[in-house]
Image: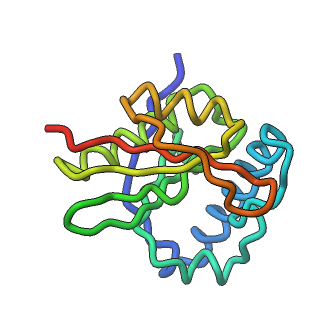
Amino acid sequence: MSARPTVVPIHPEADEALARSLLAVQHAAYAVEAALIGDDRIPPLHETLADLRAAPLRWLAAGLGEQLAGAIAWTEDAEVVDIERLVVDPAAHRRGVGRALVGAVLERAGGRRVIVATGRDNQPARTLYESFGFTPTGDQEVIEGLWVTRYTLTGRR
């Protein structure tokens, strides 16, 4: 039986080695999404180490043992939590990493509304968000020919 993911806060802006590992997982994860949606113009797929470290995001990482298996990043204010990124190392797919990360952010959100967007044709991500009760609010063409589906989850708890 495989281990459950361990979720902890991380600070890639303060730890270059961690940021490098995170960037590798991010690039691998978005390469999978690019293949699913047939478009590689996903901005985080092309992000540099400096860009990642400068992004004004809060981060949680999931580990399977000593391995960085995935991470989630968000912004928040008093009313809304906006999940900006969810990345899972392809080697850790189907092991509960994405579910653990989204669940951890939802716990932190409390009663606030949570929003997220994913590639319209990224069925695994859409299935994950919908399993938590997220409702699609519409599709948007963010770059010519690149479509995302936006979701919202009204406050829980």
> Position of 131 compared to 15: left or right?
left
> Farthest residue toward the top?
1
Q: Picture quarter containing residue 79?
A: bottom left
| On-image quarter of the C terminus | top left
> Position of 147 compared to 103: left or right?
right
> Farthest residue toward the left?
157
Residue at x 53%, y 23% (from the top left corner): 2
Q: Is residue 20 visible?
A: yes
In the rendering, at what x and y percent does residue 115 appear?
40, 51
> Position of 136 compared to 9: left or right?
right
Decide: is 92 above or below 105: above
**How is colour applied across the structure in the image?**
rainbow
Q: Nearer the viewer, residue 125 or 100?
A: 125
Decide: is 156 above or below 39: above
Q: Is residue 69 visible?
A: no
In the rendering, at what x and y percent does residue 21 appear?
65, 62
In the rendering, at what x and y percent does residue 44 appear?
68, 64
Decide: is 65 above or below 47: above
Q: Picture quarter containing residue 142?
A: bottom right
Residue at x 72%, y 60% (from the top left corner): 24
In the rendering, at what x and y percent does residue 56 appear?
46, 78
Number of numbered labels in the structure image:
0
Residue at x 62%, y 72% (from the top left corner): 17
Residue at x 74%, y 58% (from the top left corner): 27
Decide: is 125 above or below 115: above
Q: Nearer the viewer, residue 71 or 2?
A: 71
